[in-house]
Image: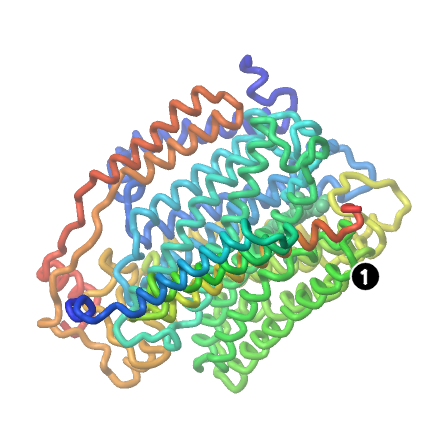
Amino acid sequence: MEKTNKVFPGKLVIGFLLSIVMTVLAAWIALGTDFSKSVIMWMIGALAIFQAGVQLIMFMHINEGKSGMINTINIVYSVFIAAVIVAGSIWILTTGHAAH
Amino acid sequence: MSVDQILVTGDPLILASQIAILLTIIGAVVGITYFKKWRYLWEEWLTTVDHKKIGIMYILAGVAMFFRGGVDGLMMKAQTSRPNMEFLDAQHYDEVFTTHGIVMILFMAMPMLIGIMNVVLPLQIGARDVAFPKLNALSFWTFFVAAMLFNISFVIGGSPDAGWTSYFPLAGKEFTPGVGNNYYAIALQIAGIGTLATGINFIVTILKMRAPGMTLMKMPMFTWTSLVTSILIVAAFPILTVALAFMTMDRLFGAHFFTVAAGGDPMLWLNLFWLWGHPEVYIVVLPAFGMFSEVIATFSRKNLYGYKTMVASIVGIAFLSMLVWVHHFYTMGNSAAVNSVFSITTMMIAIPTGVKIFNWLFTMRKGRIKFTTSMLWSLAFIPCFTIGGVTGVMLAMAAADYQYHNTMFLVAHFHYVLIPGVVFAVFAGLYYWWPKMFGFTLNEKIGKWHFWLFVIGFNLTFMPMFFVGLDGMSRRMYTYSEGLGWEGWLGFSAAGSLIMAAGFAALCYNIYWSFRFASRDVGSDPWDARTLEWATASPVQHYNFAVVPKVDSLDPFWKMKKKGTFKLKKQDIKEIHMPSNSAIPILMGIAFGIVGFFLVFEWFTLAAIWSLGIIACLVANSFDYDDGYHVSAEEVEETERKWRGDL
Ligand code: HEM
Ligand SMILES: [Cu+2]
């Protein structure tokens, strides 16, 4: 623990800068460009996911330490389940005969 | 509301049940008071946090629920045994199949399996208890209270009657105005919370509390299946929680999640229900696979064939089981792409399952098989379950399913999966682990009666249902006219269900007989078994292991016996730290039950007041600084000396 305090926290700084860049980029895309609404949503959505990833790795250290492996599996699995539930439900309920 | 609006009146069957329930309660209270057992009951059982006792209570409740669900099943079989039968009317039949389905899956299969997991799992990994013993007790009490709440519905207020799937719009307030379906929404919610807690508890227990040296790939197969089951619980049960919360808001507060009008979507309910419902069937069947693996390895006197492929296939099944839910509603009108994808994922599940079947067969190959009762259940499981699986692949083909959907063929299929996959497994597990729980084995001779009656009865009951289904009999059909050619099949089937009931009676008699007469001198390892739960006394001391065993391979106890290293040295015995009993779980469970009851009747003020009880329990728990007690080394030594010769 003591050692990490003295070393320059490069990882944290990079994470911090990346987060700021992505946030500003998102704000600029939303406010300063005239892409169509859906393109904007897709772009800032993608930036949000990248940023979540950066924060998990740089700040939350999910892939480090004794339980790094378990944490990573956990996150990947949760994302997988959420994607299946949300994307699956939308796909099923919007493409059926009943939806038309 | 007046009393006669609350109590269900006017049906002689229900009146008889009301009287029977009243007499049973009075009998129990008088009996316990007369024998002065209240204190014993409170201190040893109701407030216990011991995983073995909690497991036994789960099993006991599960057996009672099996009886209830079984009687429902028999009533339905009686009603359809002859054309134009007038035993149950349409409404009553609806209520009976609804409660039968829910009771069997949520209040029989789940507690039976979680009960056996509770008893066996910590022992198999060499732990002293589960990770969160008090939470474990809370899980039990929420389950138990929910089961009781659900079970009083038929005498107080009326049973749910929209099927165990409770599809909207039928299950909505508009078409089912009574309180029956509120029972469904609320009782399942309470039970679901407890199950979710169990899932988390077991995951942590398995990941963090294994004996030194037991790596993941050295865990017994039952532990593996329990781990994967728990992960599935944590993945799937929140979906049920959300779906039921939506249902509750629709029914109690006039929301429109699933209604036809005002922008609701009834199909969203189907979608969410099966997103939980399909993983749920694997949640009940995976632990069963684990039990068969243990039983088959022990009685073939060989190690489990293909351990690694077995693990891989369990994980594969769990993964795929989240991806197949649409096969329950191919006929809803999905796009061709949706139905095709889900047909394929569904058929893919047959692959890992097939792998497991072959692994069991190869485990037995060239083994010196001992035909004990629990081995017989495992043997009967294989062909019966295969029939269930093969008919499942038939149903998986979306185009063909338009013919099979909601027919008796389907009902026969899932009983061929659930009864061998859950009930046979639970029976195998009970015969196998009974001595661990109680210190004596169940009688093998009565066990064989139980086995043959039940297996023959089961096949006679459900085999004909495939054929009437193919012949056009739809599911949930309470009556039919003469001359359809079904009479013979259904008469047969009804007779079969009586044979099955006789099998269950044999089990009850066996339990009674063995408690009274069975030899208590069976030692701690009556089956010459392989895993750690047999490396301690039977019945197990409250602290499980005097010294936590060290593990360096699969089947550690077998190795210890072969190498003669199963020894206890006096100087290794240390003081043991154990958790204290607590009244909070049971009190909190009761508070949940009371709040639930008031919510069912939509008496919101009372519900709000009583929910303070739940909060009070949470607060009390936060200020509970009791962190357990210590068993002295002398006491451990004395207990150990009683059962092992080498101290
Ligand atoms: C003990 C012997 C059993 C008998 C005699 C029996 C009989 C029946 C019958 C006659 C039906 C209704 C068929 C219909 O008219 O649609 C049914 C439905 C059902 N059974 Fe069983 N069953 C038994 C055991 C089980 C077990 C062990 C389970 C689960 C673990 C189970 C789960 C279900 C479910 C989920 C339904 C569907 C309920 C609904 O339609 O909503 N049954 N059973
Ligand atoms: Cu399914």
Identify the coloring.
Answer: rainbow
Residue receiving disc 1: B400
Q: Residue at x 10, y 62 (%)?
A: B633
Residue A46 image point, x, y percent: 54, 60
- In the rendered image of this protein, does residue B273 appear above or below residue B573? above
Residue in view at x 58 percent, y 79 percent: B358
Q: Looking at the picture, how far across and down is residue B510, in whole percent?
A: 46, 54
Q: In this rendering, does residue B528 appear at all?
A: no
Where in the figure is residue B260, as x and y percent of width and height?
Answer: 72, 34
Q: Position of residue B204 (x, y in %)?
A: 34, 60
Of A99 and B190, the residue lying toward us: A99
- Circle 1 crowding by C-alpha within 10 Å: few under 14, some 14–19, many from 20: few
Against B376, residue A28 (above or below) is above
The residue drawn where x is 70% and y is 36% is B169
B358 vs B251, nearest the viewer: B251
Chain for mark 1? B
